[in-house]
Amino acid sequence: MLVQLPGGWNPLLGRLALDQIPYDNPILAPLFVAVVVGTILLFGLITYYRKWGYLWKEWLTTVDHKKLGVMYIIIGLVMLFRGFIDGLMIRTQQVWANGPHSSGVFGALHGYLTPFHFGQVYSAHGLIMILLAATPLLVGFMNIIVPIQIGARDMAYPYLNALGLWITAAAAVLIMISLFVGDFAHNGWFGYAPIFELQYSPGVGVDYWIWTLQLTALGTTLGGINLLVTIIKMRAPGMTWFRLPIFVWTSLSANIIALTSFPALQVALGLVAADRYLGSHFFTAGFGGNLMLYTNLFWIWGHPEVYFVILPAFGMMSEIFPTFSEKPLFGYVTMVAASFAIAGVSWMVWLHHFFTMGAGPQVNSFFSVATMLVGIPTGVKVFNWAFTMYRGRITYSAAMLWAIGALFMLLVGGMTGMMLAIPAINYMVHNSVFVIAHFHSMLLVIVYAIFGSVIFWFPKVFGFRLDEYWAKVMFWLFTAGSALVFVPMYMLGFMGMTRRLDYVFNPAWHPYLEVMEVGIAVYCLSVLAFVVLLYVSIRDRVKNRAGADAWGTARSLEWLAHSPVPFYNFAVTPHVNARDELAWRREHGMDALEPERYVDIHMPSNTGMALYIGALTFVLGFGLTWRIWWLSLLSLAAIILLMIIRSFRGDDGYIITGAELERMEKEALRNRAQADGKYVSGGRGQVAGTAIAYGRNGASMGGDPFNSSRDGI
Amino acid sequence: MSAHGNAVDPKKAVLWDTEYHGHDVISTRSLGFFLYLLSDGMIFATLFAAYGVLSYSHNYFGGPTPSQFVHPWYTFTQTVSLFLSVLAYGMGMAAMKNRNRGGLISGLLGALVLGVVFLALDVHDMAVLAGQGITVATSAGASAFIVLTQVHAAHIFFGLIWILVMIAQVSSRGFTTDTVGRLLSLRMFWHLQAIIWVFVYVFVYLWGYMS
Ligand code: HEM
Ligand SMILES: [Cu+2]
């Protein structure tokens, strides 16, 4: 034992003991029972319907980028829900524990959560939302869409892709386990020195926090490398750099950020771990440690990270706007440049998270100006989107509504960010709920873009469209919830309410807190609407079946593949002739042309190895958290051993013959014939609301910029 | 220019590439590994930053400073063994170019032995320091010194495992796409560790000794 641990430790179980299970907690105990019952029920159902084999063969051992992406998105949605429940608990505590006369239950003086428990809830909320909800959702979409958009058959490293997924899953399981075994950190999602040192946080909470973050960092780095190489190396012939869809460009810039910034997080947390496990003094208050070193290292990753999550969202918006405006994206080249400018500048602004450190006027001015510079490329993007819609033939489909919502959120969040970037203002509102409202506006951009993309790309993956009506119901409920929660939050920020209060002392704030609680109730309704949306859409899946181009006006290469995309994506690699390849082929009447002959193709085989290694990383994280040394060493050795075994075995893949391909393609084309022409953008079909069709003046923009051929009409 | 990014003439357009066989496996893998090494470089850059911040006199908290406990001449033997290891690896790779399996394996064995010497010297150094009471727990400065050098040593350790695996694979399989690709990646890895060692030696040992 290198450090003095309070409480017991034994060689077999480490710090694990029965009293670490919070069976007497009135909130966690029933939840635990529910989870156990639910798991048994789920396993029972799978066994009953004899689906284990299917699950194993088709999902758990898959290396298919689309299935891995779908699993990323499922993890993301589940964790989004978990994070939402945390948010609901925070809001409920604050509206309840308001003023000296508020009541308290479950051992809390005010409200229903003790300060220690409340601290865990908001820490878990932040970590989950950023790293286990937003990140997997975006990585999932990049996984599914990028290879198809560039005409590739899979990612560059299919096996590594599976490994990234299972490591992310391990991180999600680790943080979920912390609910029921031991406790979680109470130091906020970004951690404060020295509160996370062993001396002040003797429990296992901080250790859970460290290892969950480390696992997500590892998974994201692996995924980032994979996407970068895929984009650089796997583009179809003719897919030159300046024909790449913008979503690919933003994925590229985002993953450059991920690749270069996540190591900083890994080091920051590694040093915290060294302090807690080895007794070093990087961030301790005594022995020459430096508290602000931690904060700097964390935000050197932390700020690039926020752009890592927003850039793919920008890419998604850039795909949705042109499709439903029936125009090419305005300012393609500036869009590319803006993405890279944002990625570059995001590296030079980290200090704006702690202007109040007091580094002096020169330092603060530098970072203030650098931060405000981000507004320029972001503004370029906003105008580009606006000009894309300008004089377009806009269809207010559900996906478009979400994208427009994202644009509004971006305006609000960007403006308040600019305010925060001015140190004189920042000193007033730093650590107030104004900051919380700012970054929630920003993160909502991502959530809006993600739901827009779920609707937009769902038919590509599953072959049928989601129900437009319920998608819109959900949109309006979600938007109402956002307004009700975050407008009062901005106001409270101006009134001086600080963040992370387990007890809100000022009764005058009660009305605002109540409005926010109502907003949470509306959010709950939107969650329900999402469930209904899924139910209704799956019920009506035959009616909503989609052709290759599910929207009739889509533009990029992924819409040339069948819906649902076959596991080999394109039977024959497409040759790209233009930016917006599909729109170009449609314009020249070539979008229905199929290849004449098929040759053998080579595909990677499935493997359970990634799943085993992912599971072992969970065991490793758990062992380290509880300081069960033999288990940690054993799982680390097993991971290395499995990697060596895998390297000896290699993967020869398998061949699909041209004849097989032809048969599968024929069948896909038959299905397509039944589905094509059912959805027509432009105010007809099942789209509610009228389209705004301006008179077209193609000449003013040179050539034929609108080229919205309206096939099927 | 149209909105289509220099689109080709539709009449002459090729729509499908039946004979397209995709990317070259080895160069794709090398690129990915190179990107991984970039992130590894970032790890060291961050550790160096932490070391720099924690190398003021107050960070040693009145305890021993590097000028009292590093021995550049002793550590120079580490430098020499690591560089010779890289050289041996390089000679092995030169043998590979001539499809000389025996030459490659002796090169790898040389790299392995010299790497083990490097690690043994490092472990001995750490043991001596611990005997003098200098551990990670001594002061923030000592923590930064030890963690930076030992993270580098850990890289060497995993590199040695990898060299062993490659010796086994090349002797059983010979030169295949897999083994050659891995040997190239391992070469990048091994060189990077040597380059980082130059920084460690200069900034931590030499600079520490002089300050
Ligand atoms: C126009 C661009 C932006 C500017 C000028 C900006 C500015 C700022 C500033 C100055 C702060 C520090 C506030 C304080 O703690 O006193 C901050 C916090 C934050 N911002 Fe932004 N921001 C921008 C975009 C974004 C984006 C795109 C995201 C995420 C998607 C984001 C997420 C956050 C988060 C998470 C925090 C606070 C983290 C915490 O303290 O827990 N921001 N922003
Ligand atoms: Cu920031």
Image (cartoon, rainbow, N blue to C red):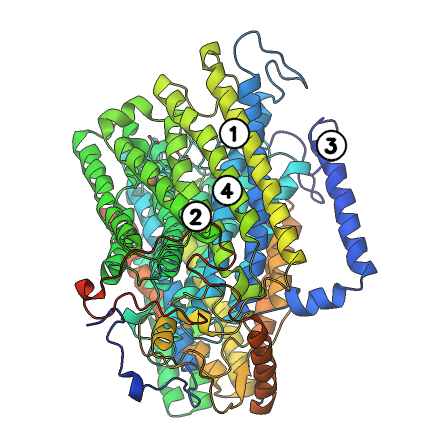
| CA distance separating discs 2 and 3 | 41 Å
**Ligand 2 shown in quarter:** top left
How many neighbours does mark 2 have within 10 angstroms: few (below 14), some (14-19), or many (20 or more)? many
- Please determine whether, in this image, residue A553 is positioned above or below residue A186: below
Q: Nearer the viewer, residue A360 or A283?
A: A360
Q: Which residue sits at x=46%, y=45%? A: A447
> Helix, strand, or loop for circle 3?
helix
Q: Is residue B86 above or below residue A178?
A: below
Q: Tell me the kind of residue under disc 2.
A: Leu
Q: Can residue B209 be seen at all in this image of the molecule?
A: no
Q: Is residue A439 left or right of residue A203?
A: left
Residue A435, image x and y in percent? 37, 30
Residues beneath discs 2 and 3 located on the same chain: yes
Residue holding disc 3: A29
Q: In terms of sequence position, does the residue under pointer 1 or pointer 2 come before the other? A: 2
Asked which secondary structure carries label 2, the reply is helix
Q: Which residue is mark 2?
A: A401
The label shown at residue A468 is none
Q: Earlier in the sequence, mark 3 or mark 1?
A: 3
Circle 4: residue type: Met
- Asked whether the beta carbons under mark 1 and mark 2 sit within 8 Å of each other, the answer is no
Residue annotated with mark 1: A519
Mark in the foreground, 1 or 2: 2
Q: Is residue A593 above or below residue B99?
A: above
Front label number (2 vs 4): 2
Residue at the outermost right position: A48
Q: Where is residue A36 shown, x and y percent of the image? A: 76, 43
The chain identifier of the residue carrying mark 1 reads A
Label 4 vs label 1, nearer the camera: 1
Mark closer to the chain start, 2 or 3: 3
